Image: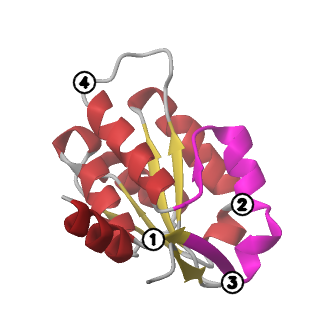
Amino acid sequence: MEQPTVDFTIGKVKRIALIAHDGKKKDLIQWCERNKEILQQHFLCGTGTTARMITDQTGLPVKGYNSGPLGGDQQIGAKIVQGGIDLVIFFSDPLTAQPHDTDVKALQRIAQVYDIPIAINKASADYMITSKFMSKEYVHSVINFRAQIEERAETL
């Protein structure tokens, strides 16, 4: 019988997804500028408009995916599943209805499933970026999905 969990290592250089709802883009850009020294040591990506605005206004290189409503949240979720994202910083706007709310919830869920740290506001992002784990490797356990699939296939 296979182990119920598998260990994954988040390397010293983190792959960080940066996302913000329209009402929080300015806050995220300011946060990135304040944390530029740390962020420039890592690989940054983000949803379309947010990625471009961060690059234009801070000079940080941010690989852009589609905008959130056009599938960018789902693209980042897929990168998490593939092991290509280590941290998510998502400045969400809890006071404004979002047309793609189901995509946001799916992204948050997949980050939880894969045990990926996700900050949803400035305070949690500050805690994450100043963590002792930002400058070293971090090993975390994730559900062994292959074993779970095999077990389910046998019982169905």
Residue 34: which quarter of the image?
Answer: bottom right
Residue at image coords 79%, 64%: 131
Give the residue number, with chain letter if any, for mark 1: 61
How many labels sit on residues? 4
**Mark 4–mark 3 distance (CA, rounded to whole Å):** 37 Å
Q: Which comes sooner in the sequence, label 1 or label 4?
A: 1
Amino acid tagged 3:
Glu
Residue at image coords 45%, 83%: 2
Helix, strand, or loop for circle 1?
A: loop
Amino acid tagged 1:
Pro
Q: Nearer the viewer, mark 2 or mark 3?
A: 3
Q: Nearer the viewer, mark 1 or mark 3?
A: 3
Q: Is 72 drawn above or below residue 100 in the view shown?
A: below
Give the residue number, with chain letter if any, for mark 4: 99
Q: The magenta stretch spans which residues?
A: 115-141
Does residue 155 appear left or right of residue 57 in this picture?
Answer: left
Q: Which comes sooner in the sequence, label 2 or label 3?
A: 2
Q: Which comes sooner in the sequence, label 4 or label 2?
A: 4
Q: Which mark is residue 137?
A: 3
**Mark 4–mark 2 distance (CA, rounded to whole Å):** 29 Å
Residue 82, can we see it?
no
**Mark 2–mark 1 distance (CA, rounded to whole Å):** 17 Å
Residue 90, can we see it?
yes
Residue 76: which quarter of the image?
Answer: bottom left
Helix, strand, or loop for circle 3?
A: loop
Helix, strand, or loop for circle 4?
A: loop
